[in-house]
Image (tube, helix red, strand yellow):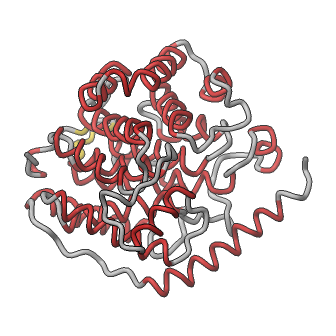
Amino acid sequence: MLLNVPELIFLRYHGTIVSIREGVIGSLLGTAVGDSLGLPFEGLVPARARRLFSGSIRQRLVFGRGMLSDDTDHACLTALAITRSPSDHDLFIRNLAWYLRFWGASLPAGIGFATLRAIGKLWLGFGCSSSGVFSAGNGPAMRSPIIGASFVDDDPGLVTMVRLSTRLTHTDPKAEAGALLAAFATRYAIKNPGKSPSSSGILESLRVALGEDITKELSILVEKADKSAASGCTTPEFAASIGLERGVSGYMYHTIPCVLHAWFRHPDDFRAAIEDLLACGGDADTTCAILGGIMGAGLGKAGIPADWLNGIMDWPWNVTSIEEAGNRLAKALESRLPQPVPAIIWPAVFVRNLAFLAIILGHGFRRLLPPY
């Protein structure tokens, strides 16, 4: 059962009371900030990233500003789908499927191959229960923190929504395990303000949801991340210890342990956690977006560095539109009734995506030049 928003006032950040509304908005904004910071580092090995981007961590995709990729798109479209159907699971997944159909048709840059194939199947007439493909990519984890922030006190609802969201595009049980763990971590961050996160609580929730056999491999990795963070190891050092010294890949069982390591190490410091994870290289926009979604939910907007929020410059998603989407989602959760959502002008999104692609290609060309 969903609780009313006014009843869920248990978040604290530096002594400030933060409502669940701020948790939802914080998750979406945290996702966007992590995404925008990670984009220029996407696919780079750590040493090359350090040479190309020296100095403080900031947005730098275009004219010192940051744009947003598929990670933010997925989180925000999931928020809109929940807003339109906060208590009807079947309607939620149908809404999300239609959003993904039109999103895919707008030619977003960097779309994952599994997600692309699943969207193609949706357009060909496959139903939501049969559109997914066997993959353990990160797509479902992009959508999970906002689900965890929305269903804080509704375990069955959280598990069902993550499962539906995951299987819409990915059917490998590893994808579902990783996505659920991201949602459980988000819920933990919200319900335990000021408390250092521990792997035991979120892993127990995962085992209850999926069973010991499915979750054993991921549990071992996350427990190792917890012990590594407690011993003072940096996230790049942990990544190297599991064979990811050249960057975190887009495989769920590589991404989630590294994301959680950064959270375990810096649970109350958004900036330090993002910087620690960003130093790992690899699939940087996605790893930082997932981490930002988890931590933003627990810290609220107040816990996200203002300079990083101000560094986002994009459309249709930016700080203003994301906050509006979060407010509407909170209203839907409070009333348990569908709420109207902003219309997305998909032809205009297509034009924006062409411009975004040109910028990304420009960055690709820049990487061919020194310093090496």
- Depicted 98 relative to depicted 335: above or below: below
What x and y, as percent, mark residue 218? 45, 26
What x and y, as percent, mark residue 163? 30, 46
Q: Nearer the viewer, residue 159 or 79?
A: 159
Seen at 63% across and 56% down, the residue is 39
- Depicted 348 relative to depicted 79: above or below: below
Seen at 42% across and 22% down, the residue is 219
- Depicted 297 relative to depicted 77: above or below: above
Q: Nearer the viewer, residue 330 or 170?
A: 170
What x and y, as percent, mark residue 312? 53, 64
Looking at the image, the residue that sits furthest to the bottom is: 347
User: Is any atom of residue 301 visible in this view?
Assistant: no
Instruction: Give the position of the N terminus as an image quadrant.
Output: top left
Seen at 49% across and 35% down, the residue is 256
Numbered marks: total: 0
Q: Say which quarter of the image contains residue 89.
A: bottom left
Q: Is residue 327 left or right of residue 133?
A: left
What x and y, as percent, mark residue 155? 18, 38
Q: Nearer the viewer, residue 298 or 135?
A: 135
User: Is any atom of residue 219 visible in this view?
Assistant: yes
Q: Is residue 10 left or right of residue 4?
A: right
